[in-house]
Amino acid sequence: MFNPDSSIEVKRDCEATLIPSGAKVSVKAGSFVMVTQALGNSYTVYVNGNLVRIAGKDGDALGLVILDEPDINELPGTLEEKIEMQLKTCFDPEIPVNVVDLGLIYERQILPLGRNEFGVEIKMTLTAAGCGMGPVLVNDIQEKLRAIKGITEVKVELVFDPPWDRDRMSEVARLQLGLM
């Protein structure tokens, strides 16, 4: 998998998340990595026989663009539309399709908590019950939804009934993955 001709030397130490365990690790300056994906405000890289996710803000450590997303609160749209936009920035580091188009989001509810305060409850699944990325995806979704003004609570529940299958994917996802 590792091709020295397409590798990048890391310019400075940076924090990363080990895939699929979700453990925090440090990628040291001078390490050679290969970028496998740059989506959803993060880079997935292959380093020392492992895949890790590096936050987009650390793109400079890779000698690449700092991936930054616009402030969701400055974009037009309803609360529901902003939730959808944020969910579409959440990617499984091993699959280049967002969690919405991949069909992982089964249900979402917006709950009024008080004046201009809301909770969001999400029921989602994974492509396989044994997938170790669950905690990483849950944390990513929680962080991104909490960035929306007025959302003060986010609960994400992983469910496996009904089990996920390819029929849940959007047409866009099937095209991206070459399944059409």
Image (cartoon, grey):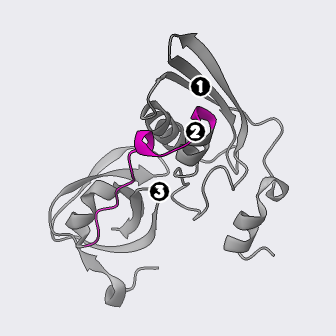
Element at label 1? strand
Instruction: Compare marks 1 and 3 and give the one earlier in the sequence.
Output: 3
Side (left or right) of 21 relative to 95:
left
- Residue labelled with disc 2: 83
Q: Quadrant of residue 71?
A: top left
Q: Which of the two residues, 131 or 83, is positioned nearer the viewer here?
A: 83
Kind of residue at badge 1: Val
Q: Amino acid at mark 2?
A: Ile
In the rendered image, residue 119, in percent from the top left (x then y), is placed at 56, 20
Residue 173 image point, x, y percent:
70, 64
Q: Are marks 1 and 3 in contact (CB under 8 Å)?
A: no
Spatial distance from mark 1 to mark 2, Cα to Cα?
A: 9 Å
Of residues 91 and 66, the one drawn nearer to the viewer in this rendering: 66
Measure the C-alpha gap from mark 2 to mark 3: 14 Å
Q: Is residue 4 above or below residue 54?
A: below
- Residue at point 63% right, 18% down? 111
Q: Quadrant of the C terminus?
A: bottom right
- Marks 1 and 3 sit apart, C-alpha to C-alpha, by 20 Å
Is the Cβ of the residue at disc 1 closer than 8 Å to that at disc 2? Answer: yes
Task: Mark 2 vs mark 3: give the one in front.
Answer: 2
Q: Dot 2: what SS?
A: helix
Identify the residue position indicated by label 3 in the image: 40
